[in-house]
Image: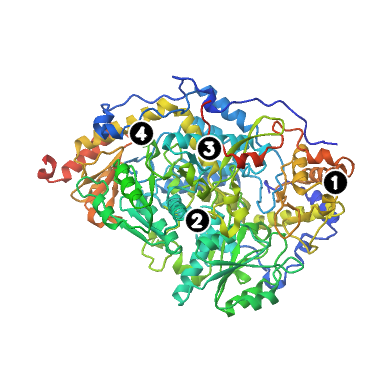
């Protein structure tokens, strides 16, 4: 087999050196009852060519060549060629977690750059080396807030990504952490601050909001911070569309930022792998989950980096660790680092401005359901959601996400996303289809 | 005498921020085909940020050189043997990278209609089936993002089942040889941890276990083979003890590379386990992820698996979201799909018989290393080992040289160190896992290096204690890094 580098004679020599006569003897100590007395029921191995063909066949069973207006936490942005070039280098791809700093300075340096860029982007003091994704960063942030405040309750906005909230509930249920939701304003789509005030109490550890929220709207972070801080809770700000940070004010009032970097050159890949982040204020550093890289010097006095503050982590603290996370998303974080380097200070701004322009072009033709300011996605009320999307599919367009699955009260609405990749002609087709499906009264309103 | 390597020049490189100069660009966007929008008008002036202070500004060629130079400061599997115990650093076939980039798979959106995602769903279904066959379990969820995440999922499944039976119980038993993620996971799942000492031979003490298991015990988390690389020979009895008292057996699959095609956890009493696809199934570690941590369960736990579940309706794949007993989601969407593709490519390449052959070679390599090194390093536990072997530094420590020093000296010989000081039950552990993708020549060189270091310790311990000497970065002051943490670059 091409992955096994021994010839039969080498194998024989090694068996001899081990003092065993056959490979089977290596397993002689296994009790008979545990052994699998038959071959695995899996087909024999196949060639590279056949493997490529297998996955091409599967890919052909997926939709091909569709324009898409799906966002909802996963965005279709262009991936600069340099990103794949860098992460395809074996030195990054096939190395382990950089515990041996002397021969892992490449990975360590890029993580240090990553942590710095995430701080610059979010306005926070410190950022970790990555979490699995945005959805798991949310419960980690909630648990971090609970440790920091000594309180246990969590208030989460309904305009936070619905699947992130589901993940939060899974973790919270077993932590004895009550989670309550608060609403959004049906007119603006922004936080229902009165509902938040009403539900706020002195036992609340964290208020969790998202901006741009699940409806694409730049939400009221400052107001949420005022309410949270007024009762001694921390404000956790979530983001799913990292490109928005090229143009939107960073959530400087947050205590913890929990986000998803998929937008930074990470292919949608049917839901993963992506990279989450947690960034926070210096004072909460010791409660942070996940790996951190710090600057130091080597014995010759040269700048060098290493993993640090590991006394928070599971391999040192075991059941007292801040999280059980071990493997994170290092290579994906590297992709985001290359992306941020390629676009840089001007490029990320320009990219965000293009997203804004595209979404507002489309929104200018159809009426967004909410009046709040939006970045690159927005909600539209349509006469018949399923009919609309069926029509669009015939034109090789995947329409917006029907919201009824997550918000029963919005079952007459879709969430449409436009990025720099979205073509004007496709937007015209979508707008046309929506307008033709709508009643005249709604169009002119 | 160091035969495997000799020094070569490596480029110095500043941080990207120190390379930046205003106005430099590495990108160009297409002309906007719609009217530009005034950001302050569209978003409200208060919502628009100022320029991102300190963000990079460099050209494309500089970006290329920056990351290329940094990459050369890493050691990688592509360079040579990476014998980290319990990490299963095996060769990462590049075909896996190629197929993961197949356009309609890599660019599939998790919310695209099921009718347009049949290929992605088929990939997941086929991987689920293959992993169920390999583990001998009844059902598999692919949702967890990595091993520790799989552990959490598995323990939550146990909790859900026990809750349905009327009492979630209070504690999880964990051997003292376990990975740190095990106790950390139990705590996050809301359980108290009871550490159980290993027997004098380093394995589960079933006599002691029978005394400990009571109505408060939800499960035992066990790694098999354990972190000494030794198969838990009493695993079936352990399972019986647990099951008799209504408790469950969780298996940490970190060491599954020793068992694939040889023995199946489902056949020796395990109720739930996770796999590390980035270990056993060769998806790359990527400098610390991404991984994937599928969880395999027996039928009794299947109703509790995270939603959604794949199901076959007629000729089509569909999602079943309506799972009333599900523990809920552990991650958005369906799992680290791109990693799943790589793992399936690996399984297809080996096939059933090939996977077993890989296991045989992995064990052969570890046994061979043990035989050839046991005259030079103390072997604290003498049972037959499988895919890894654990020595102790007892003999070298008498001369003032510890496992961490030996590991650093190994770097000078052109190898990545083994796992240092783990498992905790071995004093000064040297935990060596070669995997099956090392040939005899590479392993012989490794053995020669280890023997040479053992001799250096006798003649010149200082040489070893100050290693590495040949790297561009010498020993890093980790204490200083932790004492005064500098976690981000700031302008001077």
The structure residue drawn at horizontal position 33% and vertical position 58%, both measured from the top left corner, is: A201
Q: Position of residue A287 (x, y in %)?
A: 51, 50
Chain on which label 1 sits: B
Q: Residue furthest right?
A: B459
Chain on which label 3 sits: A
Query: Where does label 2 land, which residue?
Result: B144
Answer with mark 2 or mark 1, whichever residue precedes in sequence. Answer: 2
Decide which of B258, A14 is in the foreground and name it: B258
Residue contact between numbered discs 3 and 4, judged by CB atoms under 8 Å: no
Answer with mark 3 or mark 4, whichever residue precedes in sequence. Answer: 3
Asked if residue B315 is positioned above or below residue B458 in the image, the reply reads below
Query: Where does label 3 land, which residue?
Result: A334
Q: Residues within 10 Å of mark 1 (few under 14, many from 20)?
A: many
Q: Residue furthest left?
A: A441
Whether residue A160 is visible, yes or no, is: no
Q: Does dot 2 land on a helix, a strand or a loop?
A: loop
Query: Where does label 1 land, which residue?
Result: B454
The structure residue drawn at horizontal position 12% and vertical position 46%, both measured from the top left corner, is: A439
Q: Does dot 4 land on a helix, a strand or a loop?
A: loop
Residue contact between numbered discs 1 and 4, judged by CB atoms under 8 Å: no
Q: Does dot 3 land on a helix, a strand or a loop?
A: helix
Q: Residues within 10 Å of mark 2 (few under 14, many from 20)?
A: many
Q: How is the image coloured?
A: rainbow
- Identify the mark at residue A421; answer none if there is no mark: 4
């Amino acid at each position: 087999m091409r992955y096994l580098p021994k010839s039969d004679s080498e194998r024989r020599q090694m068996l001899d050196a081990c003092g065993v006569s056959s490979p089977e003897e290596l397993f002689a100590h296994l009790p008979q009852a545990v052994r699998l007395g038959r071959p695995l029921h899996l087909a024999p191995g196949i060639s590279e060519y056949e493997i490529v063909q297998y996955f091409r066949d599967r890919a052909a069973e997926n939709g091909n060549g569709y324009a898409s207006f799906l966002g909802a936490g996963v965005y279709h942005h262009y991936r600069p060629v340099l990103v794949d070039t860098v992460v395809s280098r074996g030195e990054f791809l096939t190395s382990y977690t950089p515990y041996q700093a002397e021969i892992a300075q490449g990975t360590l340096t890029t993580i240090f750059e990553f942590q710095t860029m995430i701080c610059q982007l979010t306005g926070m003091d410190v950022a970790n080396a990555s979490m699995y994704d945005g959805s798991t960063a949310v419960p980690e942030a909630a648990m971090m807030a609970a440790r920091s405040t000594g309180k246990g309750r969590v208030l989460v906005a309904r305009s936070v990504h619905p699947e992130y909230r589901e993940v939060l509930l899974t973790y919270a249920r077993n932590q004895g952490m009550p989670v309550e939701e608060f609403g959004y304003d049906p007119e603006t789509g922004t936080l229902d601050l009165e509902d938040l005030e009403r539900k706020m109490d002195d036992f609340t550890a964290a208020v969790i909001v998202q901006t741009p929220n699940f409806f694409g709207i730049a939400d009221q972070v400052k107001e949420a911070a005022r309410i949270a801080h007024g009762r001694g809770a921390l404000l956790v700000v979530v983001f799913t569309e990292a490109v928005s940070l090229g143009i939107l004010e960073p959530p400087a009032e947050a205590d913890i930022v929990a986000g998803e970097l998929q937008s930074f050159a990470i292919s949608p890949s049917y839901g993963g792998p992506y990279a989450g982040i947690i960034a926070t204020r210096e004072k909460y550093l010791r409660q942070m989950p996940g790996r951190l890289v710090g600057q130091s010097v080597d014995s010759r006095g040269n700048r060098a980096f290493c993993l640090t503050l590991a006394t928070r982590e599971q391999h040192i603290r075991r059941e007292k660790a801040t999280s059980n996370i071990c493997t994170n998303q290092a290579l994906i974080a590297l992709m985001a680092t290359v992306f941020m380097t390629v676009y840089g200070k001007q490029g990320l701004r320009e990219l965000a401005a293009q997203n804004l322009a595209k979404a507002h072009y489309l929104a200018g033709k159809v009426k967004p359901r909410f009046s709040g300011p939006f970045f690159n996605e927005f909600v539209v009320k349509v006469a018949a959601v399923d009919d609309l999307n069926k029509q669009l599919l015939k034109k090789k367009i995947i329409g917006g996400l029907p919201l009824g699955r997550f918000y029963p009260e919005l079952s007459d609405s879709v969430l449409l996303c436009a990025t720099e990749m979205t073509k004007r002609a496709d937007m015209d087709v979508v707008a046309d289809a929506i307008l033709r499906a709508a009643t005249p009264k709604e169009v002119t309103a | 005498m160091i035969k495997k390597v000799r020094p070569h020049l490596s480029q110095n490189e500043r941080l990207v921020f120190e390379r930046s100069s205003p106005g430099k660009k590495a990108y160009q966007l297409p002309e906007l085909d719609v009217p530009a929008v005034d950001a302050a008008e569209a978003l409200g002036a208060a919502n628009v940020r100022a320029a991102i202070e300190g963000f990079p500004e460099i050209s494309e060629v500089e970006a290329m050189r920056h990351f290329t130079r940094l990459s050369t400061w890493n050691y990688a599997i592509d360079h040579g043997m990476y014998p980290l115990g319990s990490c299963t650093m095996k060769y990462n076939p590049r075909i896996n990278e190629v197929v993961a980039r197949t356009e309609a798979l890599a660019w599939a959106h998790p919310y695209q209609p099921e009718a347009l995602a049949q290929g992605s769903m088929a990939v997941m279904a086929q991987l689920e089936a293959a992993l169920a066959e390999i583990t001998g379990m009844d059902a598999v969820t692919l949702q967890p993002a990595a091993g520790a995440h799989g552990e959490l999922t598995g323990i939550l499944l146990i909790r859900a089942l026990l809750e349905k039976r009327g009492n979630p119980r209070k504690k999880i038993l964990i051997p003292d040889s376990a990975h740190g993620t095990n106790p950390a996971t139990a705590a996050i799942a809301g359980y108290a941890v009871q550490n159980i000492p290993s027997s004098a031979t380093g394995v589960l003490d079933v006599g002691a276990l029978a005394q400990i298991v009571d109505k408060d015990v939800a499960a035992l988390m066990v790694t098999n083979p354990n972190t000494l690389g030794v198969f838990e020979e009493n695993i079936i009895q352990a399972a019986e003890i647990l099951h008799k008292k209504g408790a469950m057996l969780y298996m940490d699959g970190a060491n599954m590379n020793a068992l694939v095609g040889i023995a199946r956890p489902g056949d020796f009493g395990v109720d739930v386990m996770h796999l590390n696809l980035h270990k056993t199934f060769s998806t790359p570690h990527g400098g610390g992820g991404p991984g994937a941590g599928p969880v395999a369960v027996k039928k009794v736990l299947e109703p509790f698996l995270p939603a959604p579940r794949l199901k076959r309706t007629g000729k089509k794949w569909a999602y079943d979201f309506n799972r009333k007993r599900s523990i809920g989601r552990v991650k958005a969407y369906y799992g680290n799909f791109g990693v799943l593709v790589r793992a399936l490519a690996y399984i297809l390449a080996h096939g059933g018989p090939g996977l077993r052959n890989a296991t045989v070679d992995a064990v052969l390599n570890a046994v061979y290393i043990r035989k050839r090194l046991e005259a030079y390093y103390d072997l604290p536990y003498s049972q037959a080992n499988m895919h890894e072997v654990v020595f102790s530094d007892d003999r070298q420590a008498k001369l003032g040289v510890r496992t961490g020093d030996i590991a650093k000296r190994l770097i000078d010989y052109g190898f990545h160190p083994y796992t240092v000081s783990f498992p905790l039950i071995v004093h000064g552990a040297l935990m060596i896992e070669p995997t099956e993708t090392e040939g005899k020549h590479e392993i012989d060189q490794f053995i020669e290096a280890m023997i040479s270091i053992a001799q250096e310790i006798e003649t010149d311990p200082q040489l070893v204690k100050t290693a590495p000497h040949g790297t561009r970065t010498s020993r890093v002051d980790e204490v200083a890094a932790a004492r005064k943490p500098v976690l981000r670059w700031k302008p001077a």
